[in-house]
Amino acid sequence: MKIIIFPALTQTVFGKKIYFVFSVRQVEDIIREIPVSPVPFSPRYVKGIVRWRDCIIPVISMEECLGFDMLNIENANRLLTVRGGEGKKERAMIKTGAGLRMLSLPIPCTPAASSEWIPEKHLVSGVYEWEEGFLLCTRIDDILSGAYAQ
């Protein structure tokens, strides 16, 4: 199985970078430039909407959705189109920067000792430590369906 990882555009934790993890099957597209239209009065993690393949889908910041502060917003020059699990139709584009990588599983990592540093930990299904930092597996179905809205 293959995964796609990319570094978070946020602070480090204990001096280590944070990476988001998605299955290759969840990723439908990687786009460098597309016009993003802002949505007034939307939550701060919703950066706008885009027209993609004749669909209107939201653009979100995973960092802000999980409660992290965005530090490198100017580096968010790519959009990753993701969809929910098997049979799900919900989609979103995730703002990201350079550093997207495809890796084959298994990779050498261990479950993190703690996830207390994640403000919205109910949106994370797993946190792992590896040589380059922390890998975060998100509950993307909850995020895409809006079940996270509080």
Image (cartoon, grey):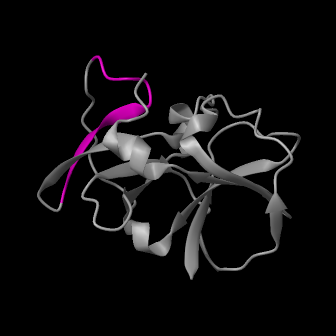
Residue in the foreground of this view, choosing between 117 and 74: 117
Residue beneath the point at 56% across and 79% down: 2
Identify whether 37 is placed above or below 140. above
Residue beneath the point at 36% across and 51% down: 93
| The furthest residue to the left | 54
* 140 displayed left or right of 31: right
Identify the magenta region. Answer: 41-52
Whether residue 109 is in magenta: the answer is: no
Residue in the foreground of this view, choosing between 1 and 36: 1
* 42 displayed left or right of 100: left
Picture mark count: 0
Q: Position of residue 6 (x, y in %)?
A: 60, 59
* 19 displayed left or right of 131: left
Quadrant holding the C terminus: top left
Residue beneath the point at 66% across and 38% down: 10
Identify whether 21 is placed above or below 3. above
Q: Position of residue 60 (x, y in %)?
A: 41, 40
Identify whether 127 is placed above or below 100. above
Q: Which corner quadrant of the image does residue 5 belong to?
A: bottom right
| Residue 88 seen in the current view | yes
Q: Position of residue 101 (x, y in %)?
A: 60, 71
Residue beneath the point at 24% across and 58% down: 89
| The furthest residue to the top | 41
Residue in the foreground of this view, choosing between 138 and 62: 138
Quadrant holding the N terminus: bottom right
Q: Position of residue 59 (x, y in %)?
A: 35, 43
